Image (tube, grey):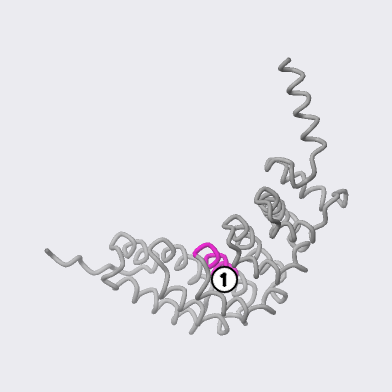
Amino acid sequence: MTQRSSANTEKEAANASPSQRPSAAAPSLASEVIAGTSGVSVEQYVAQLSDPKDATAQQAARVLEELSATKPELLAPHIETLIGLLGSARPRVVQAAAHCLPILARVTPAKVAKHLKTMQAAFPHAAELAKDGLVRTFVALCVASVTYQKRLIESFELALRTADSKQLPAWVEHILPALKGEPYAQARAVAEQRVHDAALARPVAQVVADLLGIKLRPAPSK
C-alpha cells in the first residue's frame, strides 16, 4: 500500500505544472528554461510573481533566482518590472527582485542604470528588504563603472544616515569599498558621524568603527 502511494506521488509530481512542482524543482525548472525545453517562458515566470496564488508567485521567485545565478542576461528585458516589484506586498517577491537586480547591475549595468532615477526616488519609501536590494544594486553599478559614483553619492549618504542598527554595518561594508575619491570621502564622513551618534547602540557603533579603522570614544561613565 505504501509503495503504491509513493508511486502515485511521484507520478503526480512529474505531471504537475511548473507552478505546482515543489521548490526543490526550481533549479531543474531554470535549467529547462535555459535549455529551451521549458513550457514556461521567462516572461511568464516574471508575470507569475504577481499571480493571485502565493504558491505560484513563490515558485516563480525561486526559478528566477536560479536563472539570475546561471543565466542572468535572460532577465535583462524585465529589469523595469523587477524594480516595480520591489514595492510588492509579498516579501518573497521583494526578496526575489532584490536578489536579481544587483546581479543584473553587474551583468548589464547600462540597462539597469536607465532606471536609476526611478530607483533613487523609490529608495526613501521602500521597505527594509527592498532598500537592501537597492543599496546592493547601486553598489554593483559603481563597481561596474566609476561613472555612476557621483550620480549615486546622495543615495549612499541617505542610506547611511537612515540605516537602522541592523543595516548600517552591512551597508558600510558594501558601500565604501565601491567608492573612490570624493564620493568615498563623503560616504565615509556620514558613516563616521553615525559611529559617534549616541543614539546608535554601542555594539553596533563598535562594529562600524572597526570597519572604518577608527577608535570608538570611551563610553560615558555612569
Say whether residue 207 is left or right of residue 10. left
Residue at the (71%, 67%) spot, across then down: 107
Q: Main secondary structure of the magenta part?
A: helix
| Quarter of the image where one finds residue 28 | top right
Residue appearing at x 28%, y 63% in the figure: 202
Chain part drawn in magenta: 128-139
Which residue is nearer to you in this view: 60 or 150? Answer: 60
**Residue 141, position in %: x, y?**
62, 73
Q: Is residue 62 above or below residue 83?
A: above
Relative placement, left or right, of 201 versus 83 is left
Q: Tell me where residue 99 sits by quadrant.
A: bottom right
Residue 123 or residue 215, whichever sits in front: 123
Q: Secondary structure at mark 1?
A: helix
Locate the C terminus by quadrant.
bottom left
Residue projecting furthest to the top: 1
Q: Which residue is mark 1?
A: 139
* Picture coordinates of residue 64, whole percent (x, y): 71, 55
Left or right, residue 105 beside residue 212: right
Most foreground residue, 61 or 203: 61
| Quarter occupied by the N terminus | top right
